[in-house]
Structures are given as C-alpha cells and as structure tokens.
Amino acid sequence: QVRLVESGGGLVQPGGSLRLSCATSGFTLTRYAEGWFRQAPGKEREGLACISSDGNTYYADSVKGRFTISRDSAKHIVTLQMNSLKPEDTAVYYCATDLEFHCADVPGGGNGYKYWGYGTQVTVSS
C-alpha cells in the first residue's frame, strides 16, 4: 500500500526556514520520482521540486535557490528544505509520486500523479 505523510509545516517569519518531511511506505523510494507541490487558496497547484529515480532534481523558478529536495532511502523519507521563506510561499504543501522514474509531470502541477499525501500547512507571516 503506497502511503505518503507530510510533516513539518507551521508558522514562520519571512526569511525563516522550515524543513518538510514526507514519510513514505509501500514502494521503493529510489526507484521512482517523488515531488513536492503546494496550493494556495484560489490558486492552481504548483509543482515545486522533484527528485527522479537517478537522483536528478527539478526546481520551479519560484523556489530555485531557496528550496532543496532530498531523500533518505534508508528512512523512507523525502525532505524539502525551505530557506528564505516569503509570504507568497504560504500554502498547503504535499508530496506525491506517480511511481514513474522521471519528473516530467511536476512542472504542470502533477495532475498525472497517483499517490498524494494529506498535506501540511506552511504559513509565512510577520
């Protein structure tokens, strides 16, 4: 059974940092691509970052240089380290996988992804 559970969200001031974790089960983490997404009220879901089966990464322009995706296969965890947070980063963040080896669907919002976590709220406010 494929399962993804996000954690680590919360309230942070602009310029601060948060680390989101995605605990996974039911699949071999390094055989597939995993992505991080976010959705703010009234906005489309946005693909933020992805790590492919070969370890290559993708980042959206909006987060490039500030966010870093990584994974620990031994712990079955995908991490999104978020630095230099801005108010516009406020959204529900979630991780997902489509059990594919590439990140092609992530820039478009991950509509083809099959498996999603419940999401964790990130609020950036002074």
Image (cartoon, grey):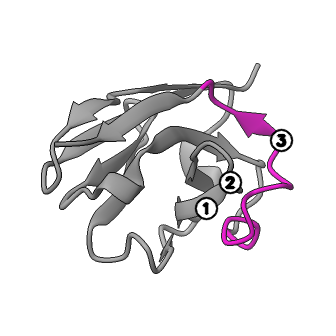
Contact (CB < 8 A) between labels 3 and 1?
no
Contact (CB < 8 A) between labels 1 and 2?
yes
* Circle 3 residue: 114
Q: Is residue 30 above or below residue 54?
A: above
Q: How far across and how far down the image is residue 51, in percent?
A: 52, 62
Q: Quadrant of the N terminus?
A: top right
In the structure shown, which secondary structural element does the residue marked by tag 1 occupy? strand
Q: Quadrant of the C terminus?
A: top left
Q: Which residues are magenta?
A: 103-118
Q: Amino acid at mark 3?
A: Lys
Q: Amino acid at mark 1?
A: Gly
**Which mark is first along the chain, 3 or 2?**
2
- Comparing 74 with 122, the one in front is 122
Q: Nearer the viewer, mark 3 or mark 1?
A: 1
Q: Amino acid at mark 2?
A: Arg
In the structure shown, which secondary structural element does the residue marked by tag 3 occupy? loop
Within 10 Å of disc 3 (Cα), the crowding (few <14, some 14-19, many 20+) is few
Residue 18 in view of the camera: yes
Residue at horizontal 52 percent and vertical 62 percent from the top: 48
Q: Residue 66 in magenta?
A: no
